[in-house]
Image: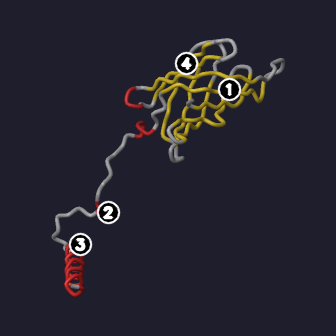
Amino acid sequence: MKSILTGIAIVFMFSTVVFAADPASTRTLPSTIKPDLVPIGSTCCINGHYLGLNEDKLCTAGETPGKGKFTMDITQAAKCGGTYTAVVTDSDDGHVTNFSGTVTASPLRGCCTMSGNSTSGSDNIKIKGTICKKGLKWKVENGTYKTNKCSGVWSIQQP
């Protein structure tokens, strides 16, 4: 019985080696499979609701630096396109500021670069940040902003 099992094992190993080494084989080897092309935008699907914090770091004379909380609702172009609009609502007074901007793939794995400008109000706010997916949620840490009066840092994360 032992010799029969040994014989079967040898035949199996030999046929596996011959099949793998056969240049006429039509079997596709794993190393020759080409991955599907994925549009860059599809990796930057940031559409959603976010909770945020901001902190002024440098302000013009007469302005007092402040801190605040806000919500940000991002609506991205179709099929995770490279543009977005956002509605930012100040958690303290309910003031709403609208933004529009771009989002592009970042060299950092799992991250995208976003930038935007306010489209309402008189502060002319410019934002920049790197948004990264942590687990199943997107998050910006140490984004920067600049207004007519102050500049500072901001962060957002999905709840």
**Label 1: which residue?**
146
Secondary structure of the residue carrying numbered label 2: helix
The quadrant holding residue 67 is top right
**Label 2: which residue?**
31
Q: Name which residue type carries label 1.
A: Lys
**Label 3: which residue?**
20
Q: Are marks 1 and 4 in contact (CB under 8 Å)?
A: no
Secondary structure of the residue carrying numbered label 1: strand
Q: Name which residue type carries label 3.
A: Ala
Q: For the view shown, which residue lies furthest in the front direction?
A: 1
Mark 2 vs mark 3: in front: 3
Camera-side residue of 134 and 78: 134
Mark 4 Cα shell of 10 Å, populated few (<14), some (14-19), many (≥20)? some
Q: In this view, does 72 lie above or below 103?
A: above
Is 37 situated left or right of 137 in this image?
A: left
Secondary structure of the residue carrying numbered label 4: strand
The quadrant holding residue 8 is bottom left
Q: Name which residue type carries label 2.
A: Ser
**Label 4: which residue?**
87
Q: Earlier in the sequence, mark 4 or mark 2?
A: 2
Is 44 situated left or right of 64 in this image?
A: left
Q: Name which residue type carries label 4.
A: Val
Q: Which of marks 2 and 1 is nearer the N terminus?
A: 2
Q: How far apart are marks 3 and 1 (CA)?
A: 61 Å
Where is residue 97? Give x, y as percent: 60, 15
Q: Do the residues labelled 3 and 4 touch (CB within 8 Å)?
A: no
Secondary structure of the residue carrying numbered label 3: helix
Q: Which of marks 2 and 3 is nearer the N terminus?
A: 3
Q: Earlier in the sequence, mark 3 or mark 1?
A: 3
Q: For the view shown, which residue lies furthest in the bottom direction?
A: 3
